[in-house]
Every structure is written in C-alpha cells, then in structure tokens.
Amino acid sequence: MGTGRPLGPAYAACRLGRMKLRAVKGTADRLPADHPRWNRVIEVAGRVLERAGIQPIATPVFEFAEVFERSVGEAADLVVQKEMYTFDDRGGRRLTLRPEFTAGVLRAYVEHGMHTWPSPVKLWSHGPAFRAENVQRGRFRQFHQVNLEIVGTGAPVADAEAIALFADVLRELGLRGVRVALGSVGDPADRARYNAYLRDALAPVAQDLSETSRERLRLNPMRVLDAKDARDQALVAPLKRPFDFLNPEARAHFDAVAACLDAWGVAYDVDPGIVRGLDYYRRTAFEIHAEGIGAQSALGGGGRYDGLVSQLGGPDVPGIGWALGMERVLDALEQAGVAAPVPDGPTLYLVPMDDEAVMEAAGLARDLRAHLRVEHGYARRAPGKGLRDADRAGARYAGLLGARERAAGVVQLKHLASGQETQVAWGDLLRTIERDTLADAVPGTGEPPRAG
C-alpha cells in the first residue's frame, strides 16, 4: 500500500533482506519471565489505591491532538512539544499518541459529566505512553505508567493523601530508601513573576546557555532549572528559586500539605527549586526518588493542576495527580535486590506415554482446567523424560497416561516434591489433588499421596 512518502533507509534495507528485524529503538519486548514482577507492580498499586476509594479508568492510547495541545499550553516544556507523536489518520484527523495520562483522563471527566458525581472523583489507570525522546537508561519512547487523579477538591489534605499513597505503593512493593522531594510552583501570578525574574537574571549570559535552555528561557523560563547540561546548572545555581516567590495563600497551602505529611509520618525533603514540565501545574509539586540507583533516580512525580479541567472545556474545578514510571520502579526494585515473585507452575502436568494418550491427556486437561491449572505433553514421552518436563514446568504433580493406565481407567499420579505415587481413577483425580493440596497447606487435615 503506497503512503506517498519516501521510505527510510532502515525500512528499505529491511525489505531487501539486509537488516535483521528487531524492536524499534526506545521500545522493548516484555518476555514471559518479566511478567510476574510487572504484574505485581500493577496489582499492588491497584490494591493500595482502591483501598482509598480510587476507581479504575482506562482511556485510549491516542486522542485528538487538540486534547494534548490544549493541556500542554503554548509555553509548555519544549521537550514534550517536540516529542509528541502526532499524525494524520486516513480521515485527515490529527491524532496524538498520549505523552502522559492526565489530559486524556480529564477529557473523559469532561465528556462523561463526572463533575456531577460525588466529589472528589478519584481515578487510577495504567498503560503505555509515548514520547520521541533521547533513549537512555530509564527513558524510553514507549514507556509505561501508573497514574492517579483526584479531581474536584483544592484541599491540601488531598495533595498530602496523593503523595502518601504514592509512598504506600512503593513501600508495599518492598522499596526502602525512597525520598519525597516536595515543593511548590505557586499560582499563575507567582510563576509569571518568577519567569520575569529569570529572564532578567539570565539575559546577560543567555548566549552561554545550551540551545534547549535558550529556547526554554524564551517559552517557559522556569524549566531552565531542570536543565541537565552542567554549564546550564552552574549558571542557574546562584539564582533564587520558585519557592521564594510564593504568595501568602500558596505558602499556607504548602505548609498545610507538609503538616499532613508530618502527622502521617511520611518523610520528605523540601525542594525549593522543584519544577514540573507542563504549564498546568499549580502550587504543590513533588517528585519521588529512590536512593542508590544512580542519576535516573526519579520514580515519578506530580502536582496540582487547578484550571486544567476548564482549559479542556469543563467546569473550573481543581485537581491533583501523579504518574509512577513502571520501568523506573522495576529498575529500582532490581537494584535494591527485592526478589521477583516466583510464578506458580501448573498444579498438574499430564505425560502421555503412547500416541493414544496424547489426545487423552489433552482432553483430561480441558476437563480439569475449570478447577486447576493443567498442562500436558503434545507428543508421547518416555516416563523419565516426561517427569523432567513436568519438573521444568514447575508442576506440583505429574500424571502419567499409557496403555496400562488406560486399561485400568487410572492415572499414575506422582507428587514431585515427595516422590510419592498412587494410582487414581480419572473421576477421583480432582478430589484427590484438592484433598492433598489442603493437607499440605494445613497439616493434620489429610494425608499426602501414598505409594501404590
């Protein structure tokens, strides 16, 4: 199918057979061995958040480009502006793969009239997001997040609860040495005053800034504080921070958030220079870092975004949210030596010892799967090799089927840990396995399989 666009050299080389197919740079395959830890992060996050009354929501991975253009704002982070994947579909509609979750969730909030629900509306979601950024450790072009939004309240206690819940998720995952960096970007007037201050202060040395920081100085000066360039960092080091420009109400809000965290025993460091990359942030801003994992220590962050819902066409309601980086958290768990969950193997692995038993094993497995996890061999196997297959699969029991078993209407059942074997009629197989599983779990309630 023609696209009307010239093909890139990598694609052309691939078509000519000169290039080995592989995942696109900045993306990664998630193999079976990766899923237990991955799924545990999502499971723990969901459990912690739903205990707090936060409901799940799923939004599309792409939206009309206007959703993100409205939320990002004209003077938003240059990186986010340039790195959004925006394209025209076959109907000529401009679409964007989500670079972050908040705009899409709030679009759904407006579209479905959630402002009429009991307030605040508390939502969590998870999934992929996309940015065409420079790839490095902890930074991908397709990355994954767990996301929280609390919409409809401006109370400082909501900010503190959001931060505490983030910390709770990490603690239940087993991470220690987690540091909350807490700050405030103030109200819009505070940001305007601070941006004017930065423009004046940096004007004499603007030519010495990196290209990215010069562009940020023009569009969104506060983001210069987030520069990674060592020369930029040296130039901004002696300057005042956003915290120095807070109005009394914004400072009182910050103090109330800090007081809640103090009362709940949530440790934090005040970071007067913390900034967030998008223009919609107001007052509370925070990041959460893991100590001892190198430069890419930020596991996620967030802040208050009062005014964003109205910017997306809804009522003028406040909100606060955060995003947890899945890849960052998984990296931190691995570096911290937190053991990955061990996936459960099948309860029963059926070994066909002749050709006729192949179909028998498959049929018996189907019958038992309403109650147990059952796997089976797909070709005849000698008993010793079949038992090794069952052991490699992590099975609790192996069931051998062959000519003698068929004639007697039984399965030769072997408990792999103890080596004990018994002959069990097909109709008694489920009851026997369930009874013996209970016996192992609660000593004294039964007996393990005995040798036949």
Image (cartoon, rainbow, N blue to C red):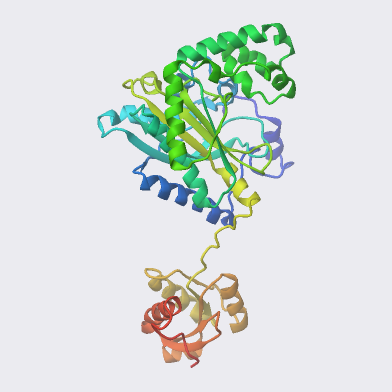
Residue at position x 38%, y 33% in the image: 157
Q: Nearer the viewer, residue 202 or 449?
A: 202
Task: Count all numbered tags in the image, as a single digit.
Answer: 0
Q: Is residue 392 left or right of residue 17?
A: left
User: Residue 277: horizontal and vertical position, in percent?
Assistant: 55, 24
Vertical order, 154 against 208 (above or below)? below
Q: Is residue 322 left or right of residue 120?
A: right
Q: Nearer the viewer, residue 270 or 140?
A: 270
**Name of the residue lying farthest toward the bottom:** 452
Q: Is residue 413 visible?
A: yes
Residue at position x 45%, y 27% in the image: 255
User: Residue 126: horizontal and vertical position, in percent?
Assistant: 46, 41
User: Residue 433: horizontal and vertical position, in percent?
Assistant: 42, 79
Vertical order, 406 against 134 (above or below)? below
Q: Nearer the viewer, residue 198 or 213?
A: 198
Vertical order, 298 against 414 (above or below)? above
User: Residue 327: horizontal and vertical position, in percent?
Assistant: 58, 43
Q: Nearer the viewer, residue 335 or 39?
A: 335
Q: Quadrant of residue 325?
A: top right
Vertical order, 198 against 164 (above or below)? above
Instruction: Quarter of the image for the N terminus: give it.
Output: top right
Q: Is residue 226 left or right of residue 399?
A: right
Q: Is residue 92 visible?
A: no
Residue at position x 51%, y 49% in the image: 171
